[in-house]
Image (cartoon, rainbow, N blue to C red):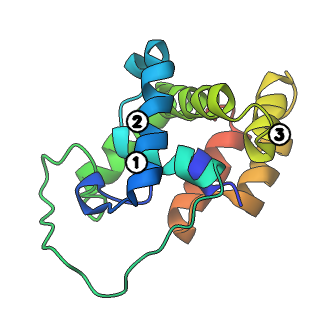
Amino acid sequence: RADYLFEGAGQGCTFVFAVDLFERLRDQLLNHVALLPSLHYHDWSLFALARASGARWHFDAEPAMFYEQHEANDTGARNSGGGVARRLALIRQGWYRAQVEAVVRLVLACYPADAPALEWARLSDAPASRIARAAYVVRHGRRRSMDRLIQVAAAALGYL
C-alpha cells in the first residue's frame, strides 16, 4: 500500500508511461520544482506520484533490457559486502530518511489527501514513534524481505 514512499519501482530507463500520465507527472514536477533538488532519484519520484494518483503500475515478467550491476553503481550492487556497507552507511548518515521525507513532501504537495504519505508524516513528526514507524514499515515497506528487514531495523533505531 505504501511501498512507493520507501523505494522506486526500478530503473527509470525501463518505465513506459501513457501520454496522459506522463503529462500529468510533468506538470506536477514543474509546479513543484522547488522540491526537486532534495530528491536524488527521479524514477522513485515518478513512481511515487504515479502510485499516489492511483495510476495502474505493471511489472512485466519478461525482461526487455539487460541491466548490468557493478561495484561502482550508484544504486544496486547489494550482493557484495561493499554494496551492503554503502547502503548501511547511507542509512546511518540520515541520507535515506531524508530521501523518504523528500518523497513524502512531493507526494503531499501534489496529493494532499494521500493516506500513506499523511500517515507516515504523522509518524515521523511524533518524537517517540520509533516502534510505530517500524510497525508501519513491517506492514507497508519495501517489497524485498531483506530490504524491509533493514528498514524495520533503521526505523526502530531512529534512522528512518
Residue 100 appears left or right of 8: right
**Residue displayed at 63% across by 31% down:** 110
Crowd around label 1: few <14 · some 14–19 · many ≥20 (10 Å):
some
Could you say where residue 95 lies in the image, as x and y percent from the top left? Answer: 46, 27
Name the residue at the top extreme. Answer: 34
Instruction: Name the mark nearer the viewer: 2 or 3.
Output: 2
- Inspect this view and state whether residue 6 appears: no
Name the residue at the front extreme. Answer: 20
Q: Write down the quadrant of residue 1 in the picture.
A: bottom right
Tell me the amino acid under the disc marked 3: Glu
Crowd around label 3: few <14 · some 14–19 · many ≥20 (10 Å):
few
Q: Is tag 2's residue or tag 3's residue first in the polypeptide sequence?
A: 2
Q: Name the residue tied to disc 2.
A: 26
Q: Name the residue tied to disc 3.
A: 119
Which quadrant would the C terminus be assigned to in this image?
top right
What separation in Å lies between label 3 and label 1 (alpha carbons)? 27 Å
Could you say where residue 46 lies in the image, as x and y percent from the top left? Answer: 44, 45
Residue 86 appears left or right of 69: right
Q: Are marks 1 and 2 in contact (CB under 8 Å)?
A: yes
Q: Write down the quadrant of residue 55 in the picture.
A: bottom right
**Residue displayed at 40% across by 48% down:** 22
Could you say where residue 67 lies in the image, as x and y percent from the top left? Answer: 15, 67
Q: Is residue 105 above or below residue 78?
A: above
Residue 143 appears left or right of 118: left
Q: Is tag 3's residue or tag 1's residue first in the polypeptide sequence?
A: 1
Q: Name the residue tied to disc 1.
A: 22
Which residue is nearer to you in this view: 100 or 108? 108
Q: Is residue 157 above or below residue 128?
A: below
- Inspect this view and state whether residue 155 appears: yes
Could you say where residue 142 lies in the image, as x and y percent from the top left? Answer: 57, 60
